[in-house]
Image (cartoon, helix red, strand yellow):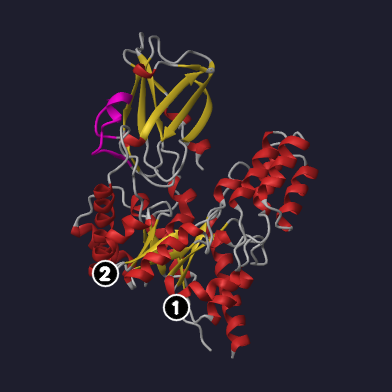
């Protein structure tokens, strides 16, 4: 069978170069298109300096720019500033209004998927469903570590979507939930900050065995009298779940877009940490049709010692995607 | 995520008359992967050689005119865009001290989806 999985990039992946003024948004779009990943995920609050005031002329410029490179929008990453005011949290009505603002802008840009921050309450999203349906924008709650596919908070959104029978509310998995192995880039940085190699190895071994994180944190912090870097490394285990890739098929009807998070690719174009070799066959088997959107988040782990090359990292990830998709297709044929 | 880049060391300059500076200024970028409304920039702590300068002495300007840190708290219609330099001016009679000194900045941000405030720290050795 031929899979209908599409490939794309999130502009988030190039945050280091864009922050430093080394790449423009158009450079990122052109690069994505050049590696066969023309689906563009945008963070308007990052990539549109005049946000939230976007004129029709600006919308036109964006669409023209994407068209020039044979690219298209896939997803709009929204934010919700519930703590915008110091004296009080946004009311429910203000939250709905803010999400409506984003749905409308997504629709103006011709975007049909919206990444909803995971902390947004399911009952607030329920109130936004009529607008999402009217504008035909799917609201996908970002399933981000330390949450995972079957976390009770996520199941609340699934419950609302089922009860309403809507196709415009669901989830949007971030592949960081499939952390099968501890990322070598994390370990290396903690060692540079003073973690002793034997303690770092202990933490990696504990994660490899999927020991529940609090045991490891106690061992490192109390029994081993770990230093600051060692305790901080152990505490990253709180955000390092390995969700079961076999359950992907059950949830596939609820998502149309994936944030393909990664921290560092090996030179041979394999991911040392995240279980893409199990996730992609499950997606292919489920007949899933959305976009795998690269979300490189390795810059912050290496920028203390070497220059960040987000393009090279993203390029390697897409070679991996091509390989794994083709392999899964062949195995199902 | 961008701590080491938030102070631009080349931008540090004295303000006021050259022979009697009234303070100094420098440019800074928001240490965050998106832009943020100014009301959520809770604090900008500037220090020289580890000694914090008074909050009242600090002015912030992302391009729309200088604000005190208290005024920023209610500047709901202004944003600090991603990757964009803003200017911090500090009233400091005599200007930035001569010779090598450590200039530090801490940005404290109120990020709604995080349970705790976000701190960005940078320190640069400056010699004017």
Q: Nearer the viewer, mark 1 or mark 2?
A: 2
Query: Is B49 situated above or below A155?
Result: above
Q: What is the spatial separation of the Cα atoms under label 1 and label 2, in whole angstroms? A: 20 Å
Range covered by the magenta-colored residues: B63-80
Residue beneath disc 2:
A133
Q: Is residue A74 in view from this perspective?
A: no
The chain containing the residue under callout 2 comes to A
Report the residue at 66% width, 43% height from top: A233
Report the residue at 36% width, 26% height from top: B88
Q: Quadrant of the C terminus of chain A?
A: bottom right
Query: Is A209 situated above or below B75?
Result: below
Q: Position of residue B63 (x, y in %)?
A: 28, 34
Q: Is residue B113 in view from this perspective?
A: yes
The chain containing the residue under callout 1 comes to A
Query: Is A127 situated above or below A219?
Result: below
Residue beneath disc 1:
A289
Q: How many marks?
A: 2
Q: Secondary structure at mark 1?
A: loop
Q: Position of residue A69 (x, y in %)?
A: 37, 69
Q: Position of residue B32 (x, y in %)?
A: 44, 42
Instruction: Evaluate if marks 1 and 2 touch, with contact meaning CB atoms under 8 Å apart.
Output: no
Query: Is A309 situated above or below A5?
Result: above
């Amino acid at each position: 069978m031929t899979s209908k999985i599409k490939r794309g990039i999130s502009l988030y992946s190039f945050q280091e170069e864009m922050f430093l003024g080394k790449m423009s948004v158009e450079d990122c779009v052109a690069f994505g298109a050049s590696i066969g990943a023309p689906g563009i995920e945008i963070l308007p609050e990052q990539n549109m300096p005049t946000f939230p005031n976007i004129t029709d002329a600006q919308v036109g410029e964006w669409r023209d720019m994407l068209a020039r490179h044979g690219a298209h929008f896939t997803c709009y990453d929204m934010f919700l500033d519930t703590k915008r005011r110091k004296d009080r949290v946004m009311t429910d009505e203000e939250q709905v209004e803010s999400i409506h603002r984003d749905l409308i802008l997504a629709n103006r840009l011709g975007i049909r998927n919206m990444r909803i921050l995971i902390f947004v309450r399911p009952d607030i999203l329920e109130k936004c469903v009529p607008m999402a349906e009217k504008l035909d924008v799917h609201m996908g709650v970002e399933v981000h570590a330390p949450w995972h596919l079957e976390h009770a908070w996520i199941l609340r959104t699934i419950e609302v979507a089922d009860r309403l029978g809507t196709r415009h509310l669901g989830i949007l998995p971030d592949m960081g939930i499939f952390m099968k192995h501890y990322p070598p880039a994390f370990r290396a940085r903690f060692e540079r900050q003073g973690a002793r190699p034997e303690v770092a190895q202990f933490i990696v071994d504990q994660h490899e065995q999927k020991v529940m994180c609090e045991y490891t944190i106690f061992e490192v912090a109390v029994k081993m009298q770990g230093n600051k870097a060692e305790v901080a490394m152990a505490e990253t285990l709180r955000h390092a779940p390995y969700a079961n890739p076999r359950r992907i098929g059950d949830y596939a009807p609820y998502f149309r877009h994936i944030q393909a998070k990664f921290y560092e690719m090996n030179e041979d174009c394999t991911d040392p940490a995240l279980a893409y070799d199990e996730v992609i066959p499950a997606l292919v088997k489920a007949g899933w049709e959305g976009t795998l959107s690269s979300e490189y988040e390795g810059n912050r782990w290496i920028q203390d010692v070497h220059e960040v090359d987000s393009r090279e990292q993203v390029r390697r990830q897409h070679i991996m995607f091509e390989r794994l998709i083709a392999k899964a297709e062949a195995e199902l044929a | 995520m961008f701590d080491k880049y938030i102070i631009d060391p080349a931008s540090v300059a004295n303000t006021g008359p050259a022979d009697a500076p009234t303070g100094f200024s420098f440019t800074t970028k928001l240490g965050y992967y998106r832009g943020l409304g100014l009301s959520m920039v809770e604090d900008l702590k500037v220090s020289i050689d580890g000694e914090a300068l008074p909050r009242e002495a600090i002015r912030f300007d992302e391009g729309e005119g200088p604000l005190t840190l208290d005024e920023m708290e209610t500047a709901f219609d202004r944003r600090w865009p991603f990757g964009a330099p803003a200017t911090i001016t500090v009233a400091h009679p005599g200007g930035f001290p001569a010779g090598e000194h450590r200039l530090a900045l801490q940005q404290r941000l109120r990020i709604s989806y995080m349970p705790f405030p976000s701190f960005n720290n940078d320190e640069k050795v400056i010699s004017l």
